[in-house]
Amino acid sequence: MSPTTKRIVVLISGSGSNLQALIDALNTPALPNAEINLVVSNRKAAYGLTRAAQASPPIPTAYLALATYLKQNPGKTRQDYDAEVAKIVLRAKPDIVILAGWMHILSEGFLELLDGRKNVDSEEDISVVKPIPVINLHPALPGQFDGASAIERAFEAFQKGEITYSGAMVHRVVKDVDRGEPIVVREVPFVKGETIEEYETKLHNVEHDIIVEATRKILGESQSS
Ligand SMILES: Nc1nc2c(c(=O)[nH]1)N[C@@H](CN(C=O)c1ccc(C(=O)N[C@@H](CCC(=O)O)C(=O)O)cc1)CN2
Ligand SMILES: NCC(=O)N[C@@H]1O[C@H](COP(=O)([O-])[O-])[C@@H](O)[C@H]1O
């Protein structure tokens, strides 16, 4: 790895098709001079962990579920879990952290360590000098269907005649869920008579593009700053 190679950490909870889009784009004009150094999942069965292991070269993975963490650490809180996830991430020294279907709302326990407002109180050299950008892929447009099950809620609104399109976005992650500054936004129209599966396929294809575009954009910004 050259000293200018950008380091990417990806957080997942499921299939990892967006992780795969990032893997496939590495060191192409779509995502030059970058590598994925770690994939973290909060679900053991996440197929994205398999995608990482089967990448060439294989991508290191980590797994930590909230329920398991709380059971193994009596008295610890969700914030403590989030801080633990942050430490796992920071050990990989990322230039960017991408939430690609990471289905866990991150508290300040995570965010304050990634943006340097608080440093890890340990001897490890994982202090943050410059805030590390954290971005999230969300299957809806800014301010429309924040939170989980966005695709289903958007499709239901279409069926009720309330909307004619939805879309997907990649945004900066802030404490308020899906309220961070949009980085890339793409509208996806509904087609009368299409099934939710047909809409979802269209949407996922758009997501696979915008997650790479947004990553390239943010890494480019950090390059020039
Ligand atoms: N602080 C932030 N954390 C996260 C954000 C964010 O914008 N700010 N984005 C989410 C991703 N996401 C929507 O894009 C999202 C994921 C999960 C949930 C949610 O309700 N999660 C529940 C658990 C659900 C489950 O385990 O199936 C929870 O965390 O309690 C809402 C929105 C990622 N994190
Ligand atoms: N609110 C967050 C959210 O709903 N994220 C969604 O999870 C899926 C992950 O797919 P993948 O595991 O195949 O990449 C994507 O559709 C992404 O938009």
Image (tube, grey):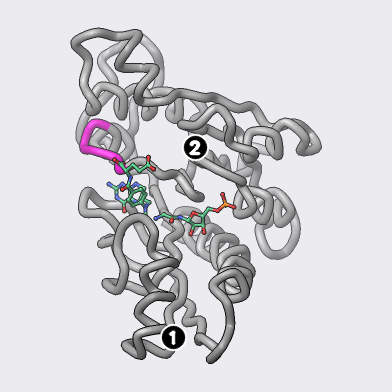
Residue found at the far right of this picture: 56
Of 34 and 65, nearer the camera is 65
Residue 199 is left or right of residue 68, and the answer is right
Percent coordinates x, y for residue 109 in the rendering: 23, 31
Residue 35 is left or right of residue 99, and the answer is right
Of 44 and 159, nearer the camera is 159
Amino acid type, residue under disc 1 in the picture: Tyr
Q: Evaluate whether residue 1 shows in this view.
A: no
Q: CA distance from mark 2 to mark 1?
A: 35 Å
Magenta stretch in the rendered image: 105-109
Residue 200 is left or right of residue 168, and the answer is right
Q: Is residue 178 above or below residue 167?
A: above
Whether label 1 lies within 8 Å of ligand 2 gets the answer no
Mark 2, secondary structure of its residue = loop
Q: Evaluate whether residue 165 shows in this view.
A: yes
Amino acid type, residue under disc 2 in the picture: Pro
Label annotation for residue 165: 1
Label annotation for residue 52: none
